[in-house]
Amino acid sequence: MSRKIANGSSCTGCTVILVQNLSDKVEILRRYASPSHYIRGKQAPDYKGEALQELEMLTVNAKEAQEFILMKILESNQATEYLSKFMNGSTNISSFKRHVPVVTYDKVQPYILRIATGEESSILCGEQIVELLRSSGTSRGEPRLMPSILKNLDRRTYLYSLIMPIMNKYISGLDEGKAMYLLFVKAETLTNSGTPIRSVLTSYYKSPHFLHRKHDLYNNYTSPDEVILCPDSQQSMYCQLLCGLVECQHVLRIGAVFASAFLRSISFLEQHWCDLVNDIRIGQLNSSITSPACRLALMNFLASPDPELADQVEAICSCGSWKGILGRLWPNVKYIEAVLTGTMAQYIPMLEFYGGGIPLVCTMYASSESYFGVNLRPLCSPADVSYTILPNMAYFEFIQLEDGLRLTDHEEVIENDKLVSLVDVKVGCYYELVVTTFSGLYRYRVGDVLQVTGFYNQAPQFKFICRRNVILSIDSDKTNEEDLHNSVTTAKKILENRNYLLLEYTSYTDTSTVPGHYVLFWEIKSTHNKSPAPLDAQLLESCCAAAEESLDYVYRRCRAHDKSIGPLEIRLVEVGAFDALMDLLVSHGSSINQYKTPRCIESSLALKLLNSKVIACFFSPRDPECSM
Ligand code: AMP
């Protein structure tokens, strides 16, 4: 007979019975390793308790779950060329910990390229790699490709299936209306051997796991699937906003995956509300929407003219300030959902402006490599969000960062015994995340820096601190100091050919425009003794364009294809501006001996100072090249 023990600390708010009998426990562990049991055959998640009860068991048994996951990964992948090199066919966990090195993408890339050109998945993974997920990280300017197997969809779905039960604990009635989530797919390509290359979200939105959610009242979206799946993001956005407006009285929550995409949609609304109002008024879709799938899907929404709703939307959109407009357009909205942590935190003020007090909710932390965790206190302020890592997503290890935030160098070799396991991290300490997945990543440095804020049962909770080395980011682009330096070095050659020198530079992301854009502050000096050629706009615009051309693929794609980043701007500052910057930073505690011009401005005082010294601004006149 099972011995059942009541455990008080429960996220369900009710007492959860934990199964402690060994055979029951083995069964539970088996389920952790394969979340498909939980997904398949379900009509809808049980929002009253079952999903949260599972979460409770998973976090109480985090240590066992992690060991079991690693054991299963090794069993499944021990024969791969990659693992055999280090473990010689063993499935022994201590052998894994002793011999398998901690790696960055450069070490995995050769295997991925071999698979892309037609070699068997088995060089890296025991199961068939069915797709390569294009992550926002880049390696020498090329997007990183993460291997993925079919079962990953179950794992991702498992994490998604926890979100609404968690929300339901805090906000009731979410099954009585709809969600206006602005979701987009990106164009996909094929490798030479025919394996699809796509983004992780495109993979999910095209999967039956997403498309078969129809029965689930908690995931009832205003956007029809055909519109979400339209690869033309402008047409998709137009139609999604139109559906959201038509259903405005039923919408209970709004959002997008990342805050940047949500804000872009608001700015799109600012530009196109007249057309949208007109469509609602006459009951016909604008002729600029040419996608047959979108046109067909919208027929139901615009079945008849609705002049009353058109007048309402028009009155709201034309009334001057857009402060708090979201609550006026969607009067029953209970929260706005989007990732607002990490680099997305820069968008909080803008969202607060448009939201006018509607709660901002961050629900999950995930990546192309693996999904990671969920926020168990979704109504907390975005600044206080911590994610509880789910121990059944992958095997997690952590590199402790010695001096608080001093980040380890990218190429540094990490000694195997320096890794800390999931349940052994310490509250307050900073770590870099390392994952081992079922799909062929072994002790892979994800590149995220996290701080432990506490534990939920045995599972640690982390605040997302930053991406290692990233200094500029608007959307999925991640530009580090070295990328920026290379880009500026290329661009400044144009100046040097005209007898000017770039004395100093720094940067920041200007998100007061939508879309946001990169700004470079440049201080320039003439090297011509007598009369220097005047600095004309064309010259500086060419520098802007050259700087953009040298940034990585993801930046160029966001700029030229997705239009989620605006043209790069150079702000020319007067001579002496960077000396004034140094004086300011030294007066605020920087050591004059060790002073280095920050390559990215974070302090608002420093930004104010540099802006006060600007003598002219120039923008890139064209989109950068973007072909893969
Ligand atoms: P990708 O590899 O393109 O899927 O991007 C994944 C990365 O986005 C993660 O490694 C994080 O750096 C970032 N990210 C994802 N979710 C969050 C989140 N909730 N908060 C902060 N950053 C996030």
Image (cartoon, rainbow, N blue to C red):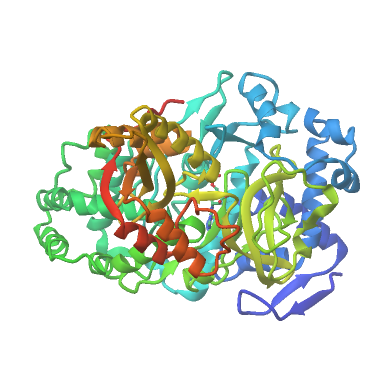
As drawn, 540 above or below 430: above
Please determine whether, in this image, residue 502 is positioned above or below residue 51: above
Total numbered circles: 0
Q: In this view, does 500 lie to the left or right of 329?
A: right
In the image, 181 versus 84, the foreground residue is 84
Q: Can residue 338 be seen in this view?
A: no
Identity of the residue drawn at 68% across and 54% down = 432
Image-quadrant location for residue 270 = bottom left
In front of the other: 466 or 65: 466
Q: Can residue 39 be seen in this view?
A: yes
Query: At which x and y percent is residue 406?
Result: 66, 58
- Judging depth in this view, the residue of 109 and 335 nearest the camera is 109
Residue 157 is left or right of residue 274, and the answer is: right
Identify which residue is drawn at 64% across, 61% down.
Answer: 405
**Residue 492 falls in image quadrant:** top left
Residue 66's x, y, as percent? Answer: 77, 55
Q: In which quarter of the image is residue 185?
A: top left
Q: The N terminus is located in which quarter?
A: bottom right
Q: Residue 530, how many percent across, how many down? A: 28, 34
Residue 561 place in picture, x, y as percent? 36, 35
